[in-house]
Amino acid sequence: MSKVENFLKSLNDFIAKAEEKDDEKLTDVVPDFPGLEILPKIVEDYEKKIAKLLRNQRKLYLKEMKAFVSKDDKPTLEAILQYFTNNLFATDEFAEEFGEVTAEFLQLTIEELCKKLMESIDPDIPFVETSTQTTNWVKDWSTKLADLMQLNTHKAIEKVLTDAIENGDSIQDVELKMKDLPEFDRKRARTTAITEILTASSRAQWESYMQSPAVVKKKWKHSGSKKNQPRENHVAMDGVEVGVDEEFKIEGSGETCQYPRDPSLSAKERVNCHCTMGPVVDESILGLSQEEKEQLRQEALKELNS
Ligand SMILES: [Zn+2]
């Protein structure tokens, strides 16, 4: 196995372990690749920050509901629902804060992974900076994910209230259900952190291969975790090669993507996917002088930054 393949395998093993032991601290799961030791701490910090934002969000809704109920003696559930959807949802700052935390996490993780990846591919061309294309992508994806997560929380809250109206539940019932919503749970923080380390891993692979002159193609590698059934169409993708800046076309569904778990894919192709992609290296380019290769990298970066 080449050095990069070794690295990608260690990274995937770490993520799979973190996923299996979801009640353990992430820092107790140690990746066995030199230089990856700092990763569990980074992911754990991110998980903790998300968990805190979710706790604050829950606190806000419970507090505001109490305040609304005490202001207007015994309001109807319909009135509470209206207050939530017309006023309260707009004041929710979760998406903004989560978006910032996520952008920071992705940027940091992509940089750390690019360092290891590029050094493993060609020590002559070490990672220096992420391209503008990737920095912009980080901002864009963080905002999208944040909005999506907030929307799902709001939908869940709305459902608690509409169900309660239908069932004739009391305000106390609603309070209890809202408190126990899985949308505010620590588990959601862990799932999100794991999904986003996978996203960062994909993007870092793409960025590293785009910047490394010797990498001419990327090769899909199917990989599953013990927890999940492998999907046949990703197994069929194993070994498929395309140019680094070209898109893969996924067997069966015909969806296209730059890398496994590309956010442009539908959830069906993304969720629980642990596939990776390896670099296809042109030995003759690898053998060029450092100056020649650096020149090629600068050209690639210029293209990515424009
Ligand atoms: Zn997959």
Image: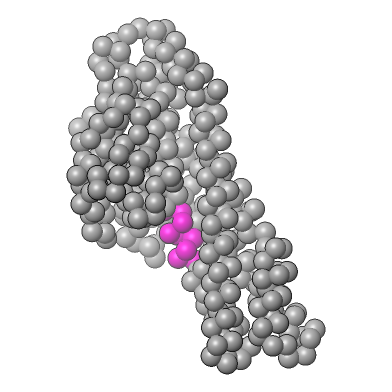
User: What residue sits 68% from the left and 73% below the top?
Assistant: 84
Residue 162: percent from left, percent from top: 57, 81
Residue 280 sits above or below residue 161 on the image: above
Q: How many marks overall?
A: 0
Looking at the picture, the colour scheme in use is one colour
Vertical relation: 231 (above or below) 24: above
User: Residue 280 vs residue 302: left or right?
Assistant: left
Q: Which residues are magenta?
A: 186-194
Residue 144 against residue 168 in the figure, above or below:
above
Residue, x 54% and y 76% (percent of image)?
Answer: 159
- Identify which residue is drawn at 23% across, 59% down: 229
Q: Is residue 224 left or right of residue 172?
A: left
Tell me, yes or no, whether the highlighted magenta stretch contains residue 187. Answer: yes
- Front residue (pair 274, 217): 217
- Write the residue at 44% across / 46% down: 263
Judged left or right of residue 110, residue 252 is left
Residue 58 visible from this viewpoint: yes
- Between residue 49 and residue 81, name the one nearer to us: 81
**Whether residue 105 is visible:** no
Residue closest to the eye, 248 or 34: 248
The C terminus, quarter of image: top right
